Amino acid sequence: MPEITGYAFPNDIHVHWSLMIVMYPYITGFVAGAFIVSALFHVFGREEFRPVARLAMATSLCFMAVATLPLNLHLGHPERSWLVMVTPNLSSAMAGFGMLYSTYLVILVLEVWFVWRQEIIQYARQSRGWKRAFYATLALGTYDTSPEAIAIDHRAATILAAIGLPGACMLHGYVGFIFGAIKANPWWSSPLMPVIFLLSAAVSGIALLSILYQVVAKLNRRAIEGRTVAALARWLWFFLILTMTLELLEIIMLAYEKSESWHIISQLLTTRLEFSFITMQMVVGGLIPLILLGVVVLMDRYLHDRVRNSLCVASAFLLLLQVFSMRWNIVIGGQLLSKSFRGLRSPYSPEIFDREGILVAIGLLIGPFLLLWIFNRILPIFGDDAHAPAHHGDSTKAPAAEVAAG
Amino acid sequence: MDHPHSPPTPGPSAPPAADAADPGRRDFLGAALTLAGGAAVLLAGAEAAASTEAHVPPPGGDAYNWEEHRWAYVIDTSKCIGCGSCVRGCKAENDVPDGFVRTWVERYIAGPGGSYVDSPKGGLDGFPPVPTAFTPTKAFFVPKMCNHCKETPCVQVCPVGASYRTKDGVVMVDGKSCIGCGYCVQACPYGSRFLNPQTHTAEKCTWCYHRITKGLKPACVEVCPTGTRAFGDMLREDDPVRQTIDHERVSILQAHLLTEPQCFYLHLDMEVR
């Protein structure tokens, strides 16, 4: 039984929204954040993001593929989850999930198709047997690679990215809304919540890509583009500043207003969440990367490539921890505090082997990277990749591959 | 709507059940859970039998018509002695799992030097004496339960419509379509809901809907020895509960949230949230 300090309503001592509900916004955060990076190239034409644009889109798709898993693992009756789609209660914020999720998934899959279409056709032509059938199916019967068709691909990708960007923002802002619109819980109830979720999604997505880009480039023995790393660092810094500002603003408002709930929330932050909030979210994951990235952004020209790249990876890693802590502090923190406003529950620690436990959570984090690996085997993320799925010997180097990056 | 000759619905007196319901709370406490369950079944049976005898079929047939009732609840905190009978009665009647409550009793001890609140096991086993660091000047008990709000946040957030409010004003959960997401548990400002660890669905006080639709009172009202709890029909003009709500100074919990609770309190202290 959890220990209670003060007085908690007798039913308030259970943490019903477990580690899986921490994982869910963490994962959709990567979906939205990675999509933002790809949109920076596709929609806003930031050339420096060309080397990560396809990686970002593939990452977004792979995380999207596992996004519903934590929810289903958490539901008391996952076999009934389809009811959310079939008989939604339209007054519920949660009922929109099915619609938002599927819409965004369709956009994402379509965009991936347009971006990789040339390669799909190329492999369909080059391969034999079942591989040929596979790629021919993916090509959806159209083998048109004329310059006009490619121009249409580019335009479609841009338009889809332009639709997908608000889609990704809504998908994730909506997760924040689920918490922000709970008036019963003062630690959640705030119109800032969707914005904070969205900004921290951008942080986590860009941070993940900063690391992934360098790792994948190293694995593929490709040069790491300095300006891409620097650009990622710049945007990461920008979004970090916004996130931290709003995260602090929310608390400062409560404290300054001396709101009814501040008494218990201040206790929550300084006792139960001391490590995860003050140490991790604010200092180790907030202040330190803020300084490190500040160095990269402001003193880039004095930095050696390797120093800059390492600083970026280090801060990106800390930021991944920061965003996880933020999710934890919101989801779990909100349940440690009783709605009696008089008591706090002892800290929650997830089981290791439980259905909603630590091992499953680790699996959920590794899963998307396995999917990414498989994705890369089927549709190489770097166009001239040696992992071309055509037969080892007879595969001709793909000459048009770089063009397809757009 | 008007049932001038219907059996005495609300109010503290319940003659046929009174002796069965008040077997001495020490006995009740001492009895094993099975015994308590058995007692409740007996009690319910006795009451059901009693009410069948006095039952005047409503015009339009025997069937319960939910458009002819609108239930409400009044809790007079000044009468509560913290015996916990209601919590035990509810547990036995509704098979409430251990560690959770559908109704509970809070103890408040307050003075100029501070305040202390507790509710050990929801008041299931009563309240042992507790030393306080300050000198108390007042102490009282406050029974709590689902407020059956009109503008209920829990029904609003249910993604599949498994939570709903009946026409006679009772907030319920359809356990067959609840997906167990827990959103309603988070949305309830009163801590009235929980996820049942056996059924994995949301659960809450139903005002003993299975009883009230048979003309009986909720188990907690039935077993309350002091008349702290009263249950009545707002569509009956002569209903004592309606009289109280209409004419007395009543309060509701967390009024600022505008949930329009249908559970009204008399003599509520400012310490109570």
Image (cartoon, grey):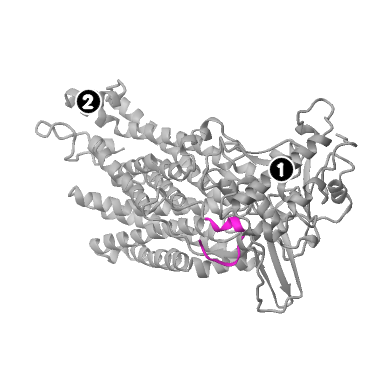
**In 3D space, how far apart are the residues under numbered discs 1 and 2 (Cα atoms)?**
74 Å
Q: Is residue B227 visible?
A: yes
Which quarter of the picture shows residue A400? top left
The disc at residue B252 is none
Q: Nearer the viewer, residue A265 or A113?
A: A265
**Chain for numbered disc 1:** B
Q: Secondary structure at mark 2?
A: helix
| Disc 1 target residue | B44
Label 2 chain ID: A
Mark 2, Cα crowd under 10 Å, few <14 / some 14-19 / many 20+, is: many
Closer to the eye: label 1 or 2:
1
Q: Is residue A5 magenta?
A: yes
Residue under pointer 2: A124
Q: Residue furthest left?
A: A393
Q: Give the residue type that dot 2 points to.
A: Ala
Residue ID at (50%, 51%): A17
What residue sits 32% from the left and 54% below the top? A210
Q: Position of residue B240 (x, y in %)?
A: 86, 47
A90 vs A404, left or right, is right
Secondary structure under badge 1? helix
In the rendered image, residues at marks 1 and 2 fall on the same chain: no
Q: Is B68 rendered above or below residue A219? A: above
Magenta-tinted stretch: A1-14
Query: Picture coordinates of residue A204 (x, y %)?
Result: 40, 53
* Residue at the limit of the structure toward the top, as seen here: A141
Q: Where's residue A14, x and y in %? A: 53, 56
Say few, some or many: other residues with alpha carbon within 10 Å of mark 1 (under 14 / 14 to 19 / 20 or more).
many
Please name the residue shown 86% across and 37% down the image: B6
Q: Using the image as rendered, state which of residue A170 and residue A237 is in the foreground.
A: A170
User: Between residues A256 and A326, which one lies in front from this camera angle?
Assistant: A326
Quadrant where the N terminus of chain B is found in the figure:
top right
> Residue A130 location in percent, x, y?
20, 24
